[in-house]
Amino acid sequence: MSALPHPSPEVPARYFMIGGFLGAGKTTAVAALAQYLTKGGTKVGLITNDQGSELVDTAMLRARGFATEEISGGCFCCRFNSLVDAANKLNTKTRPDAFVAEPVGSCTDLIATVSYPLRRIYGNQFQIAPLSVLVDPVRTEQVFGLAPGRKFSEKILYIWRKQAEEADLLVLSKVDLLDESRRQRLVCRLREEFPGKEVLEVSVRTGQGVEEWFQHLTSTTAVERPVMAVDYDIYADGEALLGWLNATVEVRSTESFDANVLLRQLAEAIRQRLAAAEIAHLKMTFSPEAGLGDIAAVSLVRSDYIPELSLTLDGPAEAGQIVINLRAEANPDELQAAIRETVEGLPVIHSGLTARLEHLEHFRPGRPTPTHRVTNEPFPAS
Ligand SMILES: Nc1nc2c(ncn2[C@@H]2O[C@H](COP(=O)(O)OP(=O)(O)O)[C@@H](O)[C@H]2O)c(=O)[nH]1
Ligand SMILES: [Mg+2]
């Protein structure tokens, strides 16, 4: 592991990490924070992370024009050296003053396995901001039994709870989705469940609470506190209950088509085909063959919700590539069968279209084995 060649070692780079469960709004928030920092004259480098390769998040952040490196094939904590390598790569390319990292949505124990080791090993080169953990409001209502809807199995909910427990800032995201009384009831419940925790209410979509959150993040550093206890057996079992699938599909049509519509229809077809499983996050991008870097992106964050476009393409397309990232509480083989069938059925949804599955990987995440785990040791001075 080499030392990070930051341009001016006396001014450490800020390191922001935005965690939270699959679909909670992390990538959207990372892009907003990157934009906020850029506006303020800070040069940013983004780091995405996932258990698989071919990441929709990376494509989305790059499409927004940010220097982004991805760590695929395992979480930050288990691939700590890759995290440092990614920061080094960004340093070589753009020399960022701040890094914004998005950990895998099924990952927890980030303070002990990422923040503290970074401080310990690279103390003078990184200034670590408080850890933000996002929780989706409707998912949270369902977890607490405040709203109808399917819950994940207990061991997956263990990870969800541990993520919230370790937050420096617990961010109730997407508050635009709740009316005032539901929002108040949920914030009260979060304060009861996680006493003493700072809870922020934010909507990146409307801008509510965003400025305050980012000001807090940029003006404070993470404070020392004891490391959270984590039962790695339950954590590993919880992760292994999640099926993971990444695929790329080449599409071509005899007639031009609207890729935004196509993505939404494909997401809806997958949702219906997987009615028996709880989808944690289905996200897909469409990159036109003849494009200049613009892409369309769609996201579905619960089986009982609707697919939403977060990036759209203006003009019609004739050919392009769809990247599919699907995470659900399901057997990965079931996910594979669903994706194969739905892709094969695409010409029925859109006449004149041919779709060819180019790459597909499906698996359950392996047991998390952190490279470092700093437990209850004194916090090194920065
Ligand atoms: N209504 C609403 N939706 C949001 C907001 N922020 C993110 N989303 C949507 O939530 C979905 C998942 O977001 P994403 O950032 O990909 O979540 P991640 O999996 O945690 O990275 C996407 O459809 C986003 O457009 C918000 O403030 N309000
Ligand atoms: Mg994401």
Image (cartoon, rainbow, N blue to C red):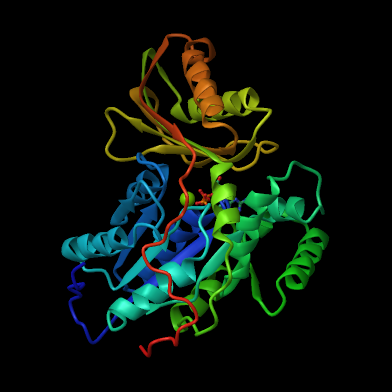
**In the picture provided, is 167 more to the left or to the right than 65?**
right
Q: Quadrant of residue 184?
A: bottom right
Determine the residue located farthest toward the front in the rendered image.
233
Seen in the picture, residue 79 relative to 335 is either above or below; the reply is below
Kindly tell me whether residue 165 is visible in this rendering: yes
Could one spot residue 202 in this view of the protein? no
Q: Quadrant of residue 288?
A: top left
Q: Position of residue 56 (x, y in %)?
A: 41, 42
Residue at x-position 41% and y-position 68%: 114
Where is 54 relative to 255, above or below? Answer: below
Q: Quadrant of residue 213?
A: bottom right
Looking at the image, which is closer to me, 209 or 145? 145
Q: Position of residue 121 (x, y in %)?
A: 30, 77
Find residue 228 and report its horizontal and vertical position in percent: 57, 73
The quarter of the picture where the C terminus appears is bottom left
Q: Is residue 300 above or below residue 267?
A: below
Q: Residue at x 43, y 70 (%)?
A: 373
